[in-house]
Every structure is written in structure tokens, then in C-alpha cells.
Image (spheres, rainbow, N blue to C red):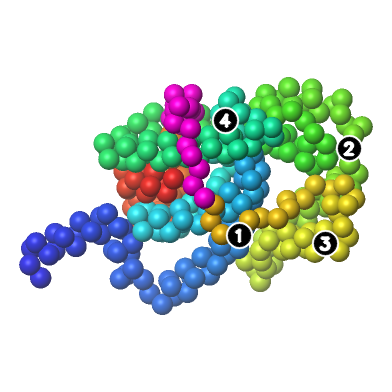
Amino acid sequence: MSPEAGESQNLLAKVFPVLGVVPTLSREDLQGDVVAGLTTAVMIVPQGMAYAALAAVRPEIGLYSAVLPVVIYGLLGTSRQLAVGPVAMVSLLTSAGLGKFADPTTEPEKYAELASLLAFMLGVIQTAMGVFRLDFLVRFLSHPVLSGFTSAAAIVIGLSQLKDLFGFYLPRDKKLHKIVENFVPEVDKTHGLTLVIGLLSIAFLLAARKIKRKVKVLKRFPDALFLIVVTIVVSELGDLKGEGVKIVGDIPSGMPAPWNLPWESVGDLAATSVSVAFIAFLESFAVAKTIAEKERYQVDARQELLALGLCN
């Protein structure tokens, strides 16, 4: 092989890390990857829909956003285990950032257009950071700060779902005391059947997690997907919609048509896009780095920025 050909292969493997990994895979590795891929594909259905609801966009958008990014990251990413797609943190920040400029309930089309613009801006920012080797900037975000932010986000996420758990309308708010203040006076409007279904679902997931830890045979059991299938059947047979339980409804088939991005709102979303770009990358890279250290291989922060940016 000529030196020029060797350099071309090295450059190609640097741009597409998967080319350097595939030749090293054993039969056992491939079997494990197939199982992991199927498991991830199964889990992304309920998770994608849930995170779409958290971001206040239609459920199918959560599903669409979990398809193409996985393929792109598989080609460009340096982590061998990281699954990209909708996550709780980014969904929450999206809802909080866009809620200032459009109400997802009364202005769903405008809100969806802003969400598309925000995703595009995130991609541009993260890709630019990778191209200009600015990955060192994320080191200034300390892990204690991120940990505190994550914990606070988890509390806000939990409280923001009270309206769906109890089955009545609450105005959107990201302040804890406001959520509680709005919730308490409306408790008497609780929809009993909705609350029962919600509590039973939570109890099932918690019980399934404990059982899966103790029974190895059930370790890969898709409890969340199983719960969704069961509730769909119960909803259809029991006519839960007719009983007042809110359901997702029909999900359009095929890929959605491209939105007309509201470019005039770029300035409004600038601050949100920068903060989400940093936090999303730091969260993903922290997971990728932890797994890489355990599996004894290296992840490249610059390449991760490029991969995540192009996924958007």
C-alpha cells in the first residue's frame, strides 16, 4: 500500500470512526451489537413519545428525531455505546426556552417551527465548535454545576407532569413554587380514571425495575414498551377516550414535510441555543467518556461535537 493510500485511509477512518471499529469486531461483538440495537430500537418508541410531550411537541416528532440521528452518529461518533436522540434535559430546556415566544397549546404550528429552528441552531453551533476546535470550552462547566442542574431538572420534570397524571389543565411554568401554587387549587378537578392509570403505570415500572435486577432472565425485558402495548389494548377495548382519558390519537405515517423556519427569530433563540448546545454536549460526552473508560477505549471530544452537531 502506498503512503498516499495509507494517509487517505487514516483520514477517512478519522472522519468516519466506524471504519476503524468494524474490522476489529468479533462474532460475539456483532451478536451483542444486534441485541443492543434491537433493545434500543424498542425502548426509543415510548421514550421518544414521552420526551416529545416534555418538549411540548407532537409525539411523532419525538419518534422522527430518534431515527436519522442514530444513523449519522453511528458513522461519525467515537463512542461505541452511546445512543443519541431525544433526552429529558434537552426536552425540558427546549420547552422552557420556546415557551417565552409561543404557546404550544394555542400556537402549535409556530411553536413547532421555533423548535425546528432551535434544533438547526444547535447543530450549527456544535458543528462550528468542532470545526474550530472549541471543545475545550465545555471544561469550564463543572460537574457539580451540571449535577445540580440535572437534579433540579428532574424535580421540575416530575412536577410538570402533574397535570397529565391528575388529568386536568395547568398553565405551563418552570418555577417550582408556581407549579405547586397552580396545582393545589385545582386538585378537586382530578380525573379519577386518569390518576388510577397513571399510578398503576408508575407502580408497574418501579416493580419491573426491581424484578429485572433480581431475575437475570428478565434483564432485557422491555417493560416500558410492554406497558404501552397493554395500555393501548386497554384503551381500545375499554374506550378510555370516551371515559375522559386523554390519548395520543392518530400518528401520521411517513416523514413530515420540512418546516418553513422562522429565520427572523434567530436572535430571540440565540441565548437558548448556546446554553442547550453546551449542556447537551456535556451531558452526552460525560456518558460516552464514562463508558469508554470502562471499556478501555478513547473518545474524541472534537469528533463528538461534529457528530452531535450534524445529528441535529
Task: Name the quadrant of the C terminus.
Answer: top left
Residue at 66% x, 71% y is 217
* 3D distance between C-alphas at marks 1 and 2: 34 Å
Residue at 57% x, 30% y is 98
- Describe the element under mark 2 as helix, strand or loop: loop
* 3D distance between C-alphas at marks 3 and 1: 20 Å
How packed mark 3 is, by other alpha carbons closer than 10 Å (few <14, some 14-19, many 20 or more), is: few
Location of mark 3 (residue) = 236
Foreground tag (3 vs 1): 1
- Up/down of 99 relative to 11, above or below: above
Pointers 3 and 4 in contact (CB under 8 A)? no
| Mark carried by residue 64 | none
Query: Residue 262 magenta-drawn?
Result: yes
Res. 248 visible in picture? yes
Tell me the kind of residue under disc 3: Glu
Location of mark 1 (residue) = 253
- Mark 3 vs 4, N-terminal side: 4
